[in-house]
Image: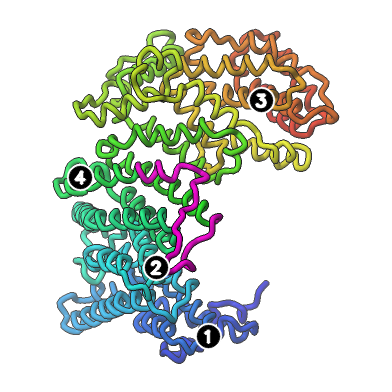
Amino acid sequence: MMSNNNSYESSSISVPECTLASVVAALEGCSNQDIAVRQPAEKALQEWERTFPGYFSHLLSVLGDSHIVKEVRLLAAILIKNAVPTVWCFSQENNRRNRQVVVGSDVGNDDDKERRQIILEQNKQERAHAKAALPNLYFSEVIDERIAVHLRLAIAAISCFDYPLEWPNLLQDLIQIAASTNHDGNMNRVRAIKAIREVLIHAKSRKIIINPLQSSPPTRGGFLDIAQMMQQAALAQKGGQTNAASAFRPLTLGITQHAASFLNTANELDGVLCIGYIKAVTELYRLISPRMVARLPEFESFKLDSRNFLAQAVQLLEQTSFWNLPYPNVGAQQHPQRQVSHESWTRFVGKVYRHVLNCFIAAISTIPLEAASAIPRCIDVVLKSIVGLDDTTIRTLPVKRLVAETLFLRDVLRQPQYCSDEMFANQQQAVQSFLSKITGGTGLPMTMLNPQLQSNNNSNDPDLEAAKASVLRMIKSASDLQDNFANDRATVSVESLVEALVTKFLRLSDDEVAEWDEDPEGRFETDEAERAVDTVDDRPRYCGGMLLVQIMRRNPVSVGRVLINFAQHCQQLPIQDTRGLLHREASYRALQLCKFSILSNSSELNFDFNVWWSGELLSLLRSNITTDQPVPMRMLQSRAVQILQIYSNCIVDEQEYTVAFVAVSHLLAAPDLVTALCAARCVNHLAL
């Protein structure tokens, strides 16, 4: 057991008075290897934080002293960030002591009132000093980037409590610094835009503090007035979001200005600021509630500005969508050293494209009506990237770009405002088909279903109608496009989109094929994690499968036919075709992901799993495949095992079920380890 002398709570450790010198000594002592020195220092810092008057100010003074070593100042910055909740809330110990002063004795006592005012004044002064000193330190030249990160987080943490009521000019002051044209302050401009983004992120988790010194004595039962708390929270939320919305226009102006400059001159500062402004606008969209935007008149100018900005943003998306955008020919200029290299230029352009897509994803959720005018062009850009680029190029693109593209298309398909009557009808039919199987053919009245499945919000807005038509085209087959959209812009058919998702996103890469032999346990665990479509992930295979499932939900019959036809086409490819085997395995994975929609529409799709089982899957399971055979062939057998597990409830004949169980049981001793592990999981499922 550890002795009491090594415990932070040891009574033998005395805590000195909190002065600037003692704080500096404690910070230096925390890095001492001698536990006899380090432990009292840590104990003192913990105690001073709990009884904070003066401690927070001393930490700020340490930060501003350039003569103190950077490591000590870095520790002070970390402690400042961590101490914000304690300083802006009351610690449990202070709460107990202060309540004894205010509530436990006669409230009318003059001494208690005086003590109450002293504590309130100390708290107020400490916080006011912190809010005045922190921004000055954050933009100071003596603060390096490591320390600036923690100060930025500290400012954002304070905004959770004081923005906008106690710190109303925070965003406006930061925007003014970010927009400064002073070349000597370029570092501060970048820091300012990063701080804006952090403040907007933290504003979503704004804290409402019920101060025991300011509140009335507890009512009977010890409960505060819940209605008053809810009203306070609602007013704070409204104030924070309206204040943030007022910063929207200057932020979007920053995007327009720096994007144009960066694309024309390849200036590094413009690239950094452009990306920073886009990130800030994205967080602003995520902060603002769609319900408030729709109901409150205070957001009318915000909606108008959003419509204008998104019309410009889609142009930026089109400009940066080319993964090999030519490097700008700027010729002789005043500051050539500020240009980024060709390689960095390509990386910056890719980041701009990705973050603009993320901005549209956030806008679709908050202001779908205002974003509608840009949706058709955005869809065209993304589809051309996914379908138009070949498999080799797709696999060289950054993963985050592929994730952003698939998430954008998924959210467009999910947005009820962009659903046409035909798409709603398809969704109603799919739900009723599934419910009829559960209820024995009776289904449920439409009045009992989700209101989004009962009617669409029809509108005469031409932009909204254009968005609906564009989303509808995305799930239409080539024949439907020829019949109904012959005079419209060139559109990617659902056959091309589905094939691209299967062959470029769901298909295993060359590295994953190599992993099959090099790390079979890791390959199995990765595949196990990818089976859950509804979990959050940032891998292209997950995002491609997630988008495929969403497309299937919107048009299950057409998409289901495309999937089945493509799987049949891959089945007919020669067994020596390695690429064909990989496509065949990927098509089976797609049928596995879309099981619900396929079975719900099995009659329209003419799909019978028992025919597939007896005609192909059973022979795959019975094949004597050794480790000498190509990896794609072993992958196909492993995928057949997983297909059987997913569709096992379709085998109704008991004798056939026994045949399936025996076939999979034999694979427990398969030479291929991944196949054996999949078989063990399948046997457990079939037995249960």
Mark 3 and mark 2 residues within 8 Å of each other at the beta carbon = no
- From the image, which quarter does the C terminus lie in? top right
Type of amino acid at the residue the image marks with label 2: Arg
- Cα distance in 3D space between marks 4 and 2: 29 Å
Image coords of residue 6 (percent x, y): 62, 79
Q: Is residue 222 magenta?
A: no
The residue singled out by tag 4 in the image is: 304
The residue singled out by tag 2 in the image is: 191
Front in this rendered view, residue 450 or 593: 593
- Cα distance in 3D space between marks 1 and 2: 22 Å
The residue singled out by tag 1 in the image is: 69
Image coords of residue 221 (percent x, y): 26, 57
Which residue sits at x=48%, y=63%? 339
Front in this rendered view, residue 176 or 635: 176
Report whether 238 appears left or right of 314.
left
SS for callout 2: helix
Q: Main secondary structure of the magenta part?
A: loop
SS for callout 3: helix
Residue 64 occupies which quadrant of the picture? bottom left
User: Looking at the image, what colour scheme do you see?
Assistant: rainbow
Q: Is residue 335 magenta?
A: yes
SS for callout 4: helix
The residue singled out by tag 3 in the image is: 585
**Residue 163 visible in the current orientation:** yes
Mark 4 and mark 2 residues within 8 Å of each other at the beta carbon = no
Type of amino acid at the residue the image marks with label 4: Leu
Front in this rendered view, residue 89 or 555: 555
Type of amino acid at the residue the image marks with label 3: Glu
Looking at the rendering, the stretch of residues picked out in magenta corresponds to 315-343
Image coords of residue 674 (percent x, y): 74, 33
